[in-house]
């Protein structure tokens, strides 16, 4: 397995994409409007597709080109469009009021998680001077921020987008750290994401019909 | 294809007889019967496979994507046995629900389709040597079973299904991150991309794996697959999903799905143990195991719905299995596997009985 060096063009581009992806995860965490969640997720996936393309060009890998195209088509276009049409517009969702912490607290927590990601992934774990050493802490931070968004944002749609951000973080780590999983595995992961989003959309629609807001704050029948 | 490959394929495909019958338009009871016959074939093939791989050579093929040793054989036996029990339970339970009009014929169709898929995906995940494919199959089985939990479409069952699908998907994604670091820990070996995820290869080359990366991989895998197992503190989806699913589906969740998660943890444990020694994996498993026992036992004190009670008992039993795995050694492993089988049979029968009781 060869590694991209951090100073090569591809390495710099990957690093830059990773930083933009992290910023978009923060934007999603801080946003209160449903169509913004979806827009930020879509933008993040487009940047991720660009990063996969960069990695594909550097490794001359056809599989990675296919994955980049799949990322753009499914995560960058299909899922955001479907989420907007089927959830945000049809269910007339506007502002997400339900948050379990204040906005500033969640952003500070996000900053702390980013620092934690660097703490965990830096020492002796990653090949020195490689692009992966720069990008994997970023991708770990994206994973943690997605999980944080799922925790502080109470609405089911926000939780769905949070899960997709976590997936994006894992994918970013995968394309820089190991170039690619076997293609069958990657294809299976894409299939799972699509099936997962479909089934979650069904649940969110069902919950919205039965509850006023489909906010997890209302999901309190079952406890203990 | 060898006989063993045929057996392995049959084990996975046979439970699909249920969905096939339901989609072809069969009513509730005939579909459940078809499902049970399929599960019985699976069980028979599992026994045949287990007798062949036990003590002999494991089954390997398709670039490592197909792999079954005696551990897989044991779990295949457990899961296919539980599927048979749950299929038989479906005959009366789903039949009665259909008769009383609680389920529409469309819901019955959905039930058998997702039930068969769920069983088949779990059995497939026990037969793959590729840890990436293991993730894909475990996540797919989560989705199929979430559809079963939300089947009745009431607010409470949708709530349970939502909690289940979102918590488990996040958990399994964390396990994928663990798989990623495991893949990376093999980078010094310069394997092809398939081999670095193939379990027997990783185990054989464990001494050459990068330890720091492997430590992180093992921890992430225990947290991730532990979410599916219901180890505390990732167990919160479990009582809701078990209480709200139709009883035969609860039996499958508790007795088959949790074990499949535990199987994935055992695979990671074997590699971690070979490279990192006893101390680190033991500390991880004992912490999660004891936490589960304590939390399971504490919540069981609260009286209430008996399906929730059984669910917390599952949390506790999974904790006991994790503790036994943490102690390790021949006796620890033997105890863990014995407990897996005991818990699977007892809990499956308990959930099916609870379904019969609630029908009265």
Image (cartoon, coloured by chain):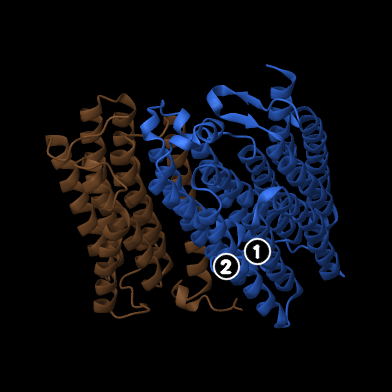
State the image coordinates of residue B275 (x, y, percent, origin top left): 50, 43
Q: Which is more toward the observer, A144 or A104? A: A144
- Identify which residue is drawn at 33% across, 73% down: A96
Q: Colour of chain A?
A: brown
Question: In the drawing, what numbered circle is on residue B232?
Answer: 2
- Residue A156 in the image: above or below residue B1: below
The first of marks 2 and 1 along the sequence is: 2
Q: Seen from this angle, which residue lies furthest top?
A: B1
Q: Is residue A214 visible?
A: yes
Q: Chain of mark 1?
A: B
Q: Is residue A38 visible?
A: no
Q: Secondary structure at mark 1?
A: helix
- Give neighbour class at mark 1: few <14, some 14-19, many 20+ (Cα, 10 Å): many
Q: Is disc 2 in contact with disc 1, using a CB cutoff of under 8 Å?
A: yes
Query: Circle 1 is placed at which residue position?
Result: B319
Q: Determine the image quadrant of residue B107.
A: bottom right
- Identify which residue is drawn at 71% across, 56% down: B249
Distance from disc 2 to disc 1, alpha carbons, whole Å, reads 8 Å
- Residue B309 in the image: above or below residue B174: below
Among the chains pictured, the one given blue colouring is B
State the image coordinates of residue B156 (x, y, percent, origin top left): 61, 71
State the image coordinates of residue A195 (x, y, percent, origin top left): 49, 46
Q: Seen from this angle, which residue lies furthest right?
A: B360
Horizontal side, residue A124 vs residue B87: left or right: left
Q: Secondary structure at mark 2?
A: loop
Please check whether the numbered discs 2 and 1 fall on a single chain: yes
Q: Chain of mark 2?
A: B
- Residue B168 in the image: above or below residue A112: above
Horizontal side, residue B95 vs residue A119: left or right: right
- Identify which residue is drawn at 66% across, 70% down: B293
Horizontal side, residue B148 vs residue B223: left or right: right
């Amino acid at each position: 397995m060869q590694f991209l060096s951090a100073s090569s063009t591809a390495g710099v581009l990957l690093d830059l994409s990773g930083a933009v992806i992290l910023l978009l995860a923060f934007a999603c965490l801080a946003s209160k409007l449903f169509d913004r969640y979806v827009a930020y997720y879509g933008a993040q996936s487009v940047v991720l597709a660009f990063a996969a393309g960069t990695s594909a060009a550097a490794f001359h890998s056809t599989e990675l080109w296919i994955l980049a195209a799949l990322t753009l088509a499914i995560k960058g276009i299909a899922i955001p469009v479907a989420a907007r049409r089927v959830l945000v517009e049809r269910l007339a969702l506007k502002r997400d009021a339900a948050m379990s912490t204040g906005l500033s607290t969640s952003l500070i927590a996000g900053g702390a998680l980013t620092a934690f990601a660097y703490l965990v992934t830096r020492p002796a774990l990653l090949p020195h001077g490689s692009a992966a050493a720069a990008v994997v802490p970023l991708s770990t931070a994206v994973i943690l921020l997605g999980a944080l968004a799922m925790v502080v944002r109470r609405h089911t749609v926000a939780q769905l987008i949070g899960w997709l951000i976590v997936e994006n973080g894992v994918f970013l780590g995968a394309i820089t750290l190991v170039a690619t999983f076997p293609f069958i595995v990657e294809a299976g992961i894409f299939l799972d994401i699509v099936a997962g989003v479909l089934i979650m959309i069904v649940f969110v629609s069902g919950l919205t019909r039965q509850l006023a807001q489909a906010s997890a704050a209302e999901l309190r029948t079952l406890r203990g | 294809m060898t006989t063993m490959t045929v057996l392995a394929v049959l084990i996975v495909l046979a439970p699909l007889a249920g969905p096939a019958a339901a989609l072809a338009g069969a009513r509730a009871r005939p579909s459940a019967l078809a499902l049970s016959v399929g599960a019985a074939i699976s069980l028979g093939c599992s026994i045949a496979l287990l007798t062949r791989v036990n003590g002999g050579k494991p089954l390997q093929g398709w670039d490592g994507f197909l792999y079954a040793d005696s551990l897989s054989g044991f779990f295949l036996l457990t899961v296919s046995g539980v599927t048979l029990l749950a299929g038989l339970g479906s005959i009366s339970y789903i039949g009665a629900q259909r008769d009383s009009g609680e389920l529409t014929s469309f819901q019955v169709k959905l039930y058998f389709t997702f039930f068969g898929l769920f069983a088949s995906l779990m059995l497939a995940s026990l037969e793959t040597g590729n840890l990436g494919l293991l993730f894909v199959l475990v996540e797919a089985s989560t989705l199929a079973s979430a559809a079963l939990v939300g089947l009745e479409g009431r607010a409470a069952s949708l709530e349970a299904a939502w909690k289940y699908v979102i918590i488990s998907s996040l958990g399994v994604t964390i396990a994928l991150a663990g798989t990623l670091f495991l893949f990376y820990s093999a980078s010094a070996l310069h394997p092809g991309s398939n081999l670095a995820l193939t379990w027997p290869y990783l185990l054989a080359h464990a001494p050459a794996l990068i330890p720091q990366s492997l430590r992180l991989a093992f921890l992430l895998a225990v947290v991730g697959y532990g979410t599916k197992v219901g180890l505390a503190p990732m167990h919160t989806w479990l009582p809701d999903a078990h209480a709200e699913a139709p009883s035969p589906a609860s039996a499958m969740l508790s007795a088959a799905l949790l074990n499949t998660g535990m199987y994935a943890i055992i695979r990671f444990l074997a590699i971690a143990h070979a490279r990192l020694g006893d101390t680190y994996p033991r500390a991880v498993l004992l912490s999660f195991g004891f936490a589960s026992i304590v939390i399971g036992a504490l919540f069981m004190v609260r009286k209430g719905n008996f399906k929730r009670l059984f669910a917390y008992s599952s949390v506790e039993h999974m904790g006991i299995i994790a503790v036994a795995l943490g102690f390790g050694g021949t006796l620890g492993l033997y105890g863990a596997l014995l407990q897996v089988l005991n818990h699977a049979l007892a809990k499956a029968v308990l959930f099916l009985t609870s379904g019969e009781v609630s029908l009265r």
